[in-house]
Each structure stands twice: as structure tokens, then as C-alpha cells.
Amino acid sequence: MSITDDPAAARAAGRISASLVGDALPLGIALLDLGSGQLLHLNREAERLLALPAAAAPLPQPLQQALPPELLRACAAERWQALAGQRAPARQMLALAGRHGQRWLQLQLSLLPNRIGLLCLQDAGAEQQLQRALQESDTRFREVTEAVRECLFVTTPQWDRLHFSSPLLLDMLGLSPVDLRQGLQQLRERIHPADRVLYDRRLLMQADGGGADLVLRIEHPAKGLRWLRLRTRLRQQAGQALVYAILADVSDEQRQREELQQARDRAEAASRAKSAFMANMSHEFRTPMNGILGMTELLLKTGLSAEQRHQAEVAQRCAEDLLRLMDGLLAYAQGGEAPAATAAAAAEHFDPRALAEAALAPLAARAAAQGLTLDLDAAPLLPARLIGDAPRIAQVLDGLLDNALKFTPRGGVRLAVASRPAAAGGLLLEFEVSDSGIGFDPAELPRLSKPFTQAEAGLARRHAGAGLGLALVQQRVQRMGGSLSARRPADGGSVFCFSVPVRQAPEPAAEAAAAAPRWPGRYILVVEDNQVNQEVIFQMLAHLGCAVRLADSAHAGLQALQDERFDLVLMDIHMPGMDGIEALQRLRRQSAGQTPPAVPVVAVTANALSGDEKRLLSHGFDDYLPKPFRQSQLLAMLSRHLDDNLHDSTESHDSSPQAAKDGTALVHDGATMSGTPNSDTCVLDAQALARLRELDPDGSSQLLPRIINAYLKSLERLLPELAQARGETLDLAVVRHVSHTLKSSSASLGALALSQRCAEIETMARLGHAQGLDPLLDAMLVEIAEVRLALTALQNTP
């Protein structure tokens, strides 16, 4: 029976509707007669939520007519039957389709007495949107955590329980889900034993409220050794402390970093090897150049005919040009300025007109051969005496004039020189090199100023050269504080101009008193193992009136310092057994001896690369003299160290048995002085012998016999050492020492083939190549025997 058929039930339903279905309630309520399937009552909120029209038919009405289809399915009979005997209502979400789109309602079904169904409705749109947003956010978050290469996880401060982790955590650590039941306790077992102390330190950082950023190694069961980066932060969340962490596999980055470090180490080792090679090459180049320039300068001080003097001066200029070229090549191989140019050049007195004429003189023959004119245009009021960097100015002129002749097929080259006042009472010396050659685009000057660059490139270029000319020119002009410019005249050719600051020189009368200092009786020790360099330094010092003692090794030099008192020591750096730096350190430490430990010691070395001077001064040397040096450089150095100590040293040294009356002495502490044999045999170079004879034209000093005798004595000392080094195991250090010593002295005596053989052996010994040395050593011994016979015959020649 339906409630509508029972008046008492109907009255009861009316009372329920009156008490529950108030229009003021914010909750939609509907009463259903489950027996007859009719809708008994709806409050206004229910009508609004169900979007029923206000003028709907009066109740009761059949449910099929009164309710939307979606709600009818939710109120099916089986749903109500399931509620029988239950006190708790049934809840669900319902989506209703409407004119304005889908609308979400929250339903609550309750079964009342007399089979009356109570349906409560509530708008769930905002809640559903919030729930959907949360679901979408959670989905996106999980997608991101799964996509990124880093693993995110949240754990407790004790790391014993995981609140969240991305799926990557298991693969990254090689763990199973079972392993994570105890949080990340298993992580410590995976960490490399050497890194566990660092891993445990994260707890100390965490206790201080800070975060950790660690790179650790783990032993992965499948992937082997892996590098992981762990970053953690401690945060308070709803009153609970949580550790938020990011774990990333950085094995590839670590491997790349290690490879980069290895590459950097290899590059630095190559750079050090290059620097050592450049130092050795500088030494090998500059040592023979020291002999050539030194002997040429001494030769020019002897009585020569006009023709001989001209030839010697040309040879000297060519040797200086060769030295400048070597310096330039070494400089750009090293990545800097030419070695001799890195230090501030000493200001020199010079005549700008004479300097320009000297720059043109070596090129006259070349210009004539090309059918070119070569002119000098000097300003009428050009000062005759200036102070400036004359060697560098000469280098710049050489470079510009060489370029002008190279790129001028017809016409001529003109050099103009003038001066004009500059700031602070100085002068600007201006040079202009113009030619009628092929010309160039001035916009190309920056490119042409780069090393190894020419206007023409490729194998078919018409003009030879290394492309260093303008690069060196610009660099040297800048070093002098000057400027370089270029232009192309309308009628063709090119014009290069540069200006450098100079100073007016004092009057000659005021300068004469200080121009030629002499130090009679000042006693100087020269520690030098090369015979040629010994002779050059001895002759230069002798011309200045100094007494000289020669020592051919650092040990002999230290013994001489113990035995006698010296005013100055010239110390070679590269010597066998003990180098000059170690010898200086021993000298400074010794307390007993005739020479005080504080005696000035000058480093004399053919290693003249950038930084060598600063390095040697930092070791305690008082001065630095790069080989080859000119007498003017030696004079300036002696002035710095001997003029400040003008005590009566002559008396203290006159009693020395080695001192000669003319203030010079030559003492052989086992020193092997270099020389050359005669042209009487094809084994010896005739020109080398002639050069030695010219140093002692009248033979009064017995220079050539003395040098030959020293060379033969050195063979008596070196050959037994070589024989002993060729024992069961080849001693490459001794082989290198013997070949190095014989290389220089043999070349000085004109035994050029022997010198070349020694150079080959020295190179192989330096590189550690023992294989193939024995045949070379045998050939060297044969050549030594031939040279010895030739020198003996030369000694016996009247």
C-alpha cells in the first residue's frame, strides 16, 4: 500500500516535509514515496539544483515525470533496498547535464519509516573542480618526476620512512620496493666505503638546519661504479620536519670532467715541454751567436784595413739580423715578444742619421740587383745625438725596408727621418718608408699585423717570407711607446710611418768622463764551461783592465771562491754536474772562504726567453746578462756593480800570483778553452782557423796553440768518461754531457763534421733514445782521432 492511500501516512509525511523542507534551508531536500514511485515534496533549493521550472505540476507526481533521468538512475529501487537495515546514508557524486553545461551534485540517500526515501542534494561544483585540479596537479607532478633525470623524494629527518619518491629512485640506486620499507637505510650500503664519512656528514648539516650538496660514489649492482649528486633541504610542513631531497646521476658529467682534466693536464704538460724545448733551442741558438758577435766585436777593435773593417761590420750586422730573426721566431713560438725585448731596453746614445744609413747600407746591393733606387731623406735640423732604444728602432727599419724591397718590382724605396717636439720636453723621432710597389689596402693593416699573414695567401703567392715582418714591427713600435700607421698614395705604392719618443743626448764633453770606465785590478771570476764563451768574456774583460779567473765548472768556481777574494762573479747557468743556480745557493750558505757570500753574482745564460730574467733574479742573482752580449752591455753591467765599490782593491789583488802587470790574469781551473785548427788539413775549417788567428795577429799571446792544447787536454778527460759510460748499461747522461761539451769546442776549432756528429748524439741522448747510439759513438771516435791528428800536425807546424 502506498503512503498516498493511507491518510495517516500522508499526514505524517506532511509533518516531515514541514519540519525538513523549509525553504530557508541551503540544502536541497526531496521526499519520495518508494511504494507508489511518486515525488511527494521538493524544497526551493532542490528545485534550483534540479533546474525544475517554478510552474511545475503540483505534487505528488510520478518520479519519472518529476526527476531528471540521471537522478532517476541514482534512485533506482535496488539502491533503496541496499539501505534497508542500515543507519548510515549512502553518498555519491552525480553529474547532471543542463543548458549551461555539466553540473555536479552530491547526493545523500536515507531510508525513513513507511518506505519514505529522503534525498538530500548539495551543489558539488566547486569541490569537484578543486578535486579535479588536485588530480591534474598530482598527475602533472608525477609526469614531471618521471620525465626528469633527477629523482625527487621526501623522507623523515631520520631517513627511516619515505613520504614520497619518484619511480626513478629504485633504478638509480639498484633497489627493490621491499628495500624501501625501511626508508633509505639501504642507501648507505650502496655508497663507496671511502665516501661514507662524507655521506654521514649530511646528518650534521641537517641538524644545524642547513642543507647538504654532496657528490658520492655508489656501487650499483648492475651498472657498477656510479657518481650521484645528493642535495637536501630540511623544511617544516604542518608542524612536521621533513627532508626534501634531489638525487641525480652525474656519472657522465664526472667522466667528462675527468677527461677534461686529463686533457688539461696533457695540454699543460705539452706547454711545459714546449717551454723547455724553447729554452733549450734558445740556448743552442744563442751560444754560437755569442761567439760570432763577441769575436766580431773584438775583431773590429784590432788594426784592420778599410776593406776588412767594412767586411767585418757587414758580418756583424748580418749576425745581429740572424739573432733578431731567431728571437722573433722563438718569441712567436713561445707566444710573446722577442726574448731580448721583454725587459726594458737600456737607453743608448745614437745618431738618427747614422742609424738610418746603417739600415740602408746592407740593402744597397739587393736594391741594385733588383734595379731599384734606395734613397735617404734626413731633415736638415735633425739632432745628431739622441737617447733612445736604437736597437729596436733598427729592427723596425729593417722590417719595413725589407718589406718595401720585397713588394717593389720597379721604381725605388725612400727612407725619410725627422723629429718634432713632444710633451714633457721630449722629442718624437719620425720615420717614413715609402715605395713604388704593389701597394695594399690600408684597411688590411690589422690583418697584416697578425703573425704569419701576407696580403697574398696560398701556394702560388709571388712573395716569399714567414709573414712575421709587420707583426714584429707593430709589436716593437708599441713596446717603445710609439705608433705605426700606413697609407696608400693616389699614384700607387705604399707609405709606412712610425714615431717613437726619444730624448736629447747631453753634450759630448759632459759624457766623455763617464763613457769609458776602467777597473784596473778588479778581480772577476768567470764560471763558464764553454770554451768559446770563456775566450770571448776573457778578451772583453781584459780590454776593460780587469783581472780574470776562469773556472770550467760550478765545483771549480766554488773552490776558487774559497781560495781567493773576487769583486764580481759571472756565472753560467747550464753546466754539467751542478748548474749555476745550485752553485749560487751553496755560495750564499757558505761562511768560510776568501770571497764573502754576498759578492755580486751575475747570471750569464743563453736562455733568454720571456720570464728568464725574473726567474733568475728571484733565485738570488744580482743581475742578468743574456748571451750573446755586446761590450756595451757588459760595460753597463760592470758599472752597476763595480762603480759602487771603488775601494782600493788593486792592492788586495796585486799580490795574487795570477795577476799580471796589465791587470789581467788567466787561470786555468781545468777550463777547456775553445779554439780551431788550421787549413792544412781538410778535417778542419780554414775560415774558423783564420778567425782565431785574427784575434792574435802577431801571435804574441799564443792564442791558437793555447786553445788547441786545451782542446786536446779536454779529450784526455772526456774520452775515458765516455768509455766508462759505454759499459754494460749505456749512461745517457754522461753521453749527453760529453757530446754537448765536444759539440761547441769542435765547432770553434773548425771540426764541423765532428761537431755535427756530436749534436746528433746529444739530441738522441736528451730524448732518451739509446737504440742506434753505438754506431754513432763509434763514428764519433773515428772523427775525434782524425781531428786529434790534424791538431797535432798543426801544433808542429812552424
Image (spheres, rainbow, N blue to C red):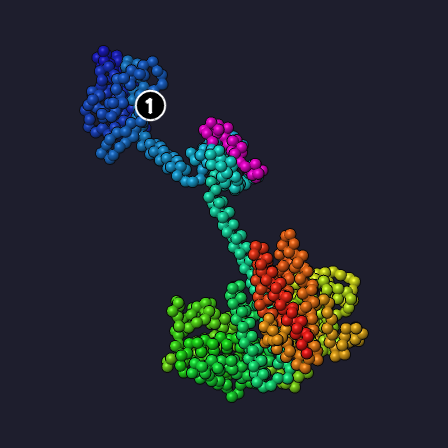
Q: Quadrant of the N terminus?
A: top left
Q: Please tell me whether residue 610 belongs to the stretch shown in magenta.
A: no
Q: Which residue is mark 1?
A: 91
Q: Which residues are magenta?
A: 175-199
Q: Is residue 270 visible?
A: yes
Residue 695 at x, y percent in the picture: 65, 78
Name the residue rendered at 44%, 84% in the picture: 373
Foreground residue, 224 or 322? 322
Identified at 68% across, 74% down, the residue is 795
Is the magenta region chiefly helix, strand or loop? helix
User: Could you say where residue 523 lies in the image, as x and y percent from the top left?
Assistant: 74, 73
Q: Position of residue 602 (x, y in %)?
A: 67, 68
Q: Is residue 380 left or right of residue 411?
A: right
Position of 776 relative to 437 (above/below)? above
At a point 71% along the width and 69% down the height, the residue shown is 550
Q: Amino acid at mark 1?
A: Arg
